[in-house]
Image: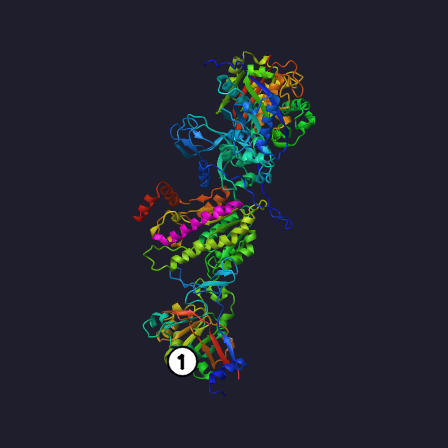
């Protein structure tokens, strides 16, 4: 059984903060399909459309029939650990700093006529000695690339505390979280979810302290919570806040959001659209500039390092919902910026996690019909991504539906949305 | 299967080795150049007479054999480059032999050389193969240590091999190496020391691992008549095999491509395993020796541990293996590691051993194994050499 | 005595016989802004973005861009701001007669009442009582409601919201009508975010100060400070808004001259 993680000691301030190192990141283009799946939390391998053979490592043609019609297809991932080793020596600094490190070979269960491939995988400490049954998942490593991890067949106590597992996740347990706006229903849910997930210190941003929002005093009274002033529209406020708590933030969840439900024609002028951009886009940019560097510097800092930056975007970021057109546009801008943040922050191992929820069950979606994503469900999705290793999450039925349609043909989706479908 | 033509009248000669060093400040071309110069010196031929070249190196990039001939002023009419790691010694021989046999070339210089800078081993691993880059290197395996740990772990569990069995091979090879002047490891190895070595990738421990180094090896392939004219002692090629990507459905590699082809090897040579006087295995980790003992017909699958227990494996004892010490004691000079056993076998059958000669060595077996591109060695090869007279 | 009394005034300032008092809050991003229901259009708070600070963005220069609404910080309300003043002549910041930008001020001290009751409403009777002590409010003068609200440096206490909205003092309907109709004031000034009380939307009419003051073509001043440094009568205010074309108001620097004698 994994040893339950105990609250890490305070770090010795006279020692150098360990610089972030990454596992090797280069991959061939074709193998990035594995990363694409892992980014969504899926374990997908190429399966030959002609003969059904499952392929691994990723390749350009079927190893059985030479077909080039290889489709990335979700896998159950069950199989047998047939060999393992524990590394006591490594060539790459990232692994040298984290030894010992367990690796193995898993023979996937055969699904069709062809033999299943053998997978070289990271092995969770709770997997038994080979031969034993395991579940394989694709996870993103600190470099943001997919790797495979064998988990025990059934969940074990304290499973997420396994050091190798923790390297592949951004588990909030014993990590310090900053929720940029704790006043919104989403912000409040996120704070509670982070505490439930084991965060022992949650900073909660508060803009416009004079606004009395139901539930916020309850949040403020939680023993894990410390409220800090933050108005993301105010550069000085962001700078002050980052100076105050930036070097201690392990996980930043940007819940600051401006949401109004206006179409292009239903709201004359740009004041509202600017306000949306000011918070949803410029606010993110300001946070990225002030909190990004200091979090990146702590990407390798012991076992409670800076690990994740969570953006709450919207499925409307991928395709504009004409009824909420300016909000959609501001989220599209944030989505684009988040991509750039990912490119910048991955060097430090800090993962940028983007959520693209469907309509939330909040006041500005009052007129929308269900299904709507409750703030609590969104918060659960955030914790799930942090614990599970995905970086792109589509919470809610609407988001999943739109995402599938968008993947299939963005133009069709655009036309359907234009006609209110 | 069509019966393969014998290598009648084709011989191997002029074994040369450039003494290994752990790290070299020289480039790979320097090592290859020294080996070519040694071939010239020992054969008495001018380099213009090498009208065929078969080369290998793992540290020559971006050059290949083309770069070699221009760099060293050769003008061959037959040129081959075989980036196949541990099988190159055998593969170069069988290709060169056919070229000479067919008249495409008269004298083929087979040469392998590599340098080893401070970080070149790691760089080599990082860029070893597409599968390696995608699915092996990024998860920390750090190259062959983990790959062979998997094979060793599986083999031990499945067939009951013990660490002592691997230790026995390492200790025997070290004893052989003590007489071989170019071996990098010059201290005796005891089983006790072997057993107490630090773990590298369990169950692989320190003395199971080859040490990367710089070095070069080479030999010539020519017609027997030519060798006689030049007064060169030579060995004959009785048989060879080569196989790539065998048994892909085995969950872990517990047999190599030799098992597919060993019957043909002995059939072509017209001998049986018990006619073999010594065996230069490919030995970058001792478990691979066991696979070769089994797959090349010395014992059944799973019996190699017992086979090891019942032989001394030393040059002067029963079933000599790796008579110069093998890569485990001499060092692994990149692609030249694939030539080490071949060059040593030529020395043994031509009576030119630099270390201890195998008594009455008439027939030697060479094993080749190489290129763990993903989870297993893709290439396997073997050749049987016989004394020329 | 100079033939030109302005020079006397300048000398008075230099010799500290005339004190210049700044009634302006610092324009800062942290200064609170009027808070409206979220579905309404919003007046921007003051925001400052660096253009450069002696760095690669501008070499030897430090400068900023700022943004804000017309009704941000210490600011001036022009008649056009309210629907009641929309059709009056000279009702916007660019057309307000400059003569109106210099005027005397009466300071009505409501500090004790405001401290006791955040929803304190200044009544016409209160003003009449004040006049009994300090004399009749002269025409074309400012009436400034001193509440010491500006001493609330904490934005939360300054805004003073609860779940029923804002609680800040201001004039009641009768007081405003009295000032406009019977005293012909230049305008009404407050230390709070609005000239009207925090709960003034529940008065009749809603926001009576805005309604009657601007309906009469007169002006408002909000977010004033240092009113406690002014005498009840006798000070002179300089209140020049930015000359914004068709502006409804503007942040401004409000200066008061006080004769010390």
Quadrant in the rendering for residue B235:
top right
Residue A342 is inside the magenta segment: yes
Residue at left offset 57%, top offset 19% = B366
Q: Residue A179 location, x and y as percent? A: 50, 52
Q: Mark 1 lies on which chain?
A: C
Category of crowding for the residue at label 1, using alpha-carbon neighbours closer than 10 angstroms: few (below 14), some (14–19), many (at least 20): some
Name, please, the residue furthest toward the left: A419
Highlighted magenta segment, given as a residue range = A323-352
Toward the viewer: B142 or C24?
B142
Q: Mark 1 points at which residue?
A: C140
Q: Is residue A33 above or below residue B274?
A: below
Q: Can residue A409 be seen in this view?
A: yes
Secondary-structure class at tag 1: loop
Toward the viewer: C7 or A224?
C7
Toward the viewer: A323 or A27?
A27
Q: Residue B333 location, x and y as percent? A: 60, 29
């Amino acid at each position: 059984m994994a040893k339950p993680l105990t609250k890490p000691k305070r770090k010795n301030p006279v020692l150098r903060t360990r610089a972030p190192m990454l596992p090797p990141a280069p991959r061939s283009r074709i193998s990035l399909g594995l990363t694409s799946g892992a980014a969504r939390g899926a374990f997908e391998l190429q399966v030959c459309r002609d003969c059904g053979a499952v392929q691994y490592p990723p390749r350009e043609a079927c190893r059985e029939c030479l077909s080039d019609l290889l489709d990335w297809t979700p896998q159950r991932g069950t199989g047998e650990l047939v060999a393992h080793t524990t590394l006591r020596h490594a060539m790459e600094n990232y692994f040298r700093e984290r030894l010992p490190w367990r690796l193995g070979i898993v023979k996937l269960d055969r699904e069709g006529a062809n033999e299943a491939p053998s997978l070289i995988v990271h092995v969770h400490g709770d997997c038994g000695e080979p031969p034993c049954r395991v579940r394989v998942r694709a996870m993103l490593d600190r470099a943001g690339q997919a790797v495979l991890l064998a988990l025990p067949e059934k969940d074990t106590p304290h499973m997420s505390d396994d050091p190798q597992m923790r390297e592949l996740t951004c588990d909030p347990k014993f990590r310090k979280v900053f929720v940029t706006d704790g006043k919104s229903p989403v912000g409040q849910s996120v704070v509670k979810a982070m505490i439930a997930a084991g965060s022992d210190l949650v900073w909660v941003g508060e803009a416009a302290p004079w606004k009395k929002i139901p539930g916020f005093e309850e949040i403020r009274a939680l023993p894990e919570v410390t409220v800090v002033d933050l108005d993301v529209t105010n550069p000085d406020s962001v700078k002050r806040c980052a100076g105050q708590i930036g070097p201690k933030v392990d996980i930043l969840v940007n819940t600051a959001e401006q949401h109004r439900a206006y179409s292009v024609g239903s709201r004359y002028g740009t004041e509202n659209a600017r306000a949306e951009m000011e918070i949803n886009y410029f606010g993110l940019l300001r946070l990225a500039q002030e909190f990004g560097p200091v979090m990146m510097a702590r990407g390798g800092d012991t076992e409670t390092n800076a690990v994740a930056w969570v953006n709450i975007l919207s499925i409307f970021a991928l395709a504009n919902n004409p009824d909420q057109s300016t909000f959609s546009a501001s989220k599209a801008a944030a989505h684009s910026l988040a991509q750039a943040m990912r490119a910048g922050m991955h060097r430090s191992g800090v993962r940028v996690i983007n959520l693209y929820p469907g309509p939330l069950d909040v006041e500005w979606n009052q007129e929308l019909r269900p299904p709507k994503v409750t703030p609590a469900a969104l918060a659960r999705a955030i914790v799930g991504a942090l614990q599970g290793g995905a970086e792109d999450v589509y919470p809610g039925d609407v988001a999943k539906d739109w995402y599938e349609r968008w993947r299939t043909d963005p133009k069709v989706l655009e036309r359907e949305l234009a006609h209110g479908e | 299967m069509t019966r393969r033509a014998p290598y009648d009248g084709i011989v191997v000669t002029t074994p040369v080795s450039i003494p290994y060093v752990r790290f070299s400040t020289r480039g790979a071309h320097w090592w290859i150049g020294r080996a070519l110069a040694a071939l010239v010196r020992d054969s008495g031929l001018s380099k213009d007479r090498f009208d065929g070249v078969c080369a290998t190196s793992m540290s020559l990039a971006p050059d290949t054999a083309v770069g070699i001939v221009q760099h060293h002023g050769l003008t061959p009419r037959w040129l081959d480059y075989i980036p196949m790691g541990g099988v190159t010694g055998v593969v170069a021989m069988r290709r060169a032999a056919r070229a000479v046999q067919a008249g495409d070339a008269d004298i083929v210089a087979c040469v392998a050389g590599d340098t080893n800078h401070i970080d070149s081993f790691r760089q080599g691993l990082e860029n070893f193969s597409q599968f390696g880059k995608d699915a092996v290197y990024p998860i920390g395996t750090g190259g062959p240590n983990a790959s062979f740990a998997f094979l060793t772990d599986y083999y031990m569990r499945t067939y009951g091999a013990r660490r002592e069995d691997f230790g026995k091979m390492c200790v025997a090879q070290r004893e052989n190496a003590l007489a071989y002047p170019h071996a990098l490891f010059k201290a005796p190895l005891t089983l006790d020391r072997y057993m107490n070595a630090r773990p590298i990738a369990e169950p692989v421990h320190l003395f199971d691992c080859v040490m990367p180094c710089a070095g070069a090896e080479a030999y010539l392939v020519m017609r027997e008549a030519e060798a006689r004219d030049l007064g060169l002692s030579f060995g004959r090629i009785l048989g060879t095999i080569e196989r790539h990507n065998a048994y892909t459905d085995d969950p872990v590699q517990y047999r190599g491509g030799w098992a597919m082809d060993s019957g043909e090897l002995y059939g072509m040579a017209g001998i049986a395993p018990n006619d073999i006087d010594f065996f230069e295995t490919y030995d970058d980790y001792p478990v691979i020796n066991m696979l070769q003992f089994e797959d090349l017909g010395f014992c059944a699958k799973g019996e190699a541990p017992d086979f090891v227990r019942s032989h001394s494996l030393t040059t002067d004892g029963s079933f000599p293996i790796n008579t110069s010490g093998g890569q485990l004691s001499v060092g692994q000079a990149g692609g030249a590691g694939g030539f080490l056993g071949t060059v040593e076998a030529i020395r043994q059958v031509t009576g030119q051993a630099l270390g201890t000669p195998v008594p009455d060595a008439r027939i030697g077996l060479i094993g080749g194994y190489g290129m763990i591109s993903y989870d297993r060695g893709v290439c396997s090869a073997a050749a049987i050499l016989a004394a020329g007279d | 005595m100079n033939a030109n009394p302005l020079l006397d005034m300048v000398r008075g300032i230099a010799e500290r016989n005339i004190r210049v008092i700044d009634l302006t809050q610092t324009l800062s991003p942290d200064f609170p802004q009027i808070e409206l229901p979220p579905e309404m259009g919003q007046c921007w708070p003051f925001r400052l973005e660096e253009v450069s600070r002696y760095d690669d963005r501008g070499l030897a220069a430090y400068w900023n861009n700022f943004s804000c609404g017309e009704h941000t910080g210490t600011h001036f309300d022009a008649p056009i701001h309210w629907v009641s003043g929309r059709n009056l002549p000279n009702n916007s910041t660019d057309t307000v007669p400059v003569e109106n930008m210099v005027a005397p001020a009466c300071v009505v001290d409501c500090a004790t009442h405001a401290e006791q009751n955040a929803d304190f409403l200044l009544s016409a009777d209160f003003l009449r009582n004040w006049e009994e002590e300090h004399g009749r409010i002269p025409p074309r003068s400012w009436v400034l409601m001193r509440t010491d609200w500006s001493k609330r440096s904490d934005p939360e206490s300054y805004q003073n919201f609860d779940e029923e909205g804002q609680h800040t003092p201001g004039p009641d309907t009768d007081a405003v009508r009295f000032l406009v109709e019977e005293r012909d004031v230049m305008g009404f000034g407050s230390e709070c975010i609005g000239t009207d009380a925090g709960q003034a939307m529940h008065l009749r009419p809603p926001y009576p100060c805005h309604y009657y003051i601007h309906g009469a073509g007169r002006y408002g001043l909000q977010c004033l400070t240092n009113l406690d440094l002014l005498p009840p009568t006798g000070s002179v205010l300089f209140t020049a808004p930015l000359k914004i074309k068709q502006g409804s108001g503007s942040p401004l620097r409000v200066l008061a001259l006080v004769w010390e004698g």
